[in-house]
Amino acid sequence: MITLIAAVGENNELGKDNQLLWHLPDDFKRFKSITSGHYIIMGRKTFESFPKPLPNRTHVIITRQNSYSFEDCLIVDSIQKAIAACPKDEENFVIGGGEIYAQSIELADKIDITKVHHSFEADTFFPAIDFNHWKLITEEFHPKDEKHAFDFTFLTYIRK
């Protein structure tokens, strides 16, 4: 199973200058809980935005750089090879960035979105979701509070 997991603004904003646009501790906790113990697929720039590899996950990095390597990470040059490197009988996660999401949305079985209820200036976006092909199965609203500057909603879609 291929699941796209992302946090997006009201206009599908993902980030700017290879950085997130918000800090939502509950979203980070959810991301860690959902992806721990699984393969995570990402582009090189997304990987390099982390201070270090994320613990308890197998990293599959997509890059066009032939000589790119990083200890304990799988390096491939296409989304198809990234998916092929993952276990077929497990849930595997695409975690970004925008180009990788765009290449994988038609291959995905599930989408886990954190919708941040605010508009942001961004240079990277999640692809538009064609809701004719997706069914919303869970929706959980969280109001802003002392730890979260914005309202947000956890949304889970499965392919129809």
Image (cartoon, rainbow, N blue to C red):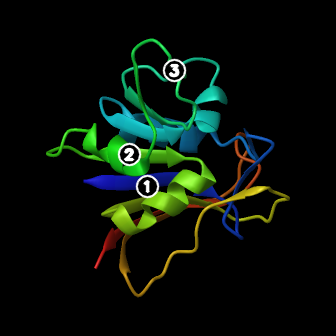
Say what amino acid the circle numbered 3 marks.
Pro
Q: Which residue appears at 56% of the width and 44% of the height?
A: 27
Tell me which numbered mark, 2 or 1, is placed earlier along the sequence.
Answer: 1
| Crowd around label 2: few <14 · some 14–19 · many ≥20 (10 Å) | many
Q: Which residue is mark 1?
A: 4
Tell me which numbered mark, 1 or 3, is placed earlier along the sequence.
Answer: 1
Quarter of the picture holding the C terminus: bottom left
Image marks 2 and 3: residues in contact by CB distance under 8 Å = no
Q: Which residue appears at 50% of the width and 40% of the height?
A: 42
| Crowd around label 3: few <14 · some 14–19 · many ≥20 (10 Å) | some
Q: Which residue is mark 2?
A: 93
Q: Which residue appears at 65% of the width and 43% of the height?
A: 24
Say what amino acid the circle numbered 2 marks.
Phe
- Can residue 21 be seen here? The reply is yes
Q: Nearer the viewer, residue 25 or 86?
A: 86
Q: Nearer the viewer, residue 42 or 81?
A: 81
Image marks 2 and 1: residues in contact by CB distance under 8 Å = yes
Q: CA distance from mark 2 to mark 3?
A: 15 Å
Residue 110: percent from the left, percent from the top?
34, 62
Q: CA distance from mark 2 to mark 1?
A: 6 Å
* Residue 53, disc: 3
Q: Nearer the viewer, residue 154 or 79?
A: 79
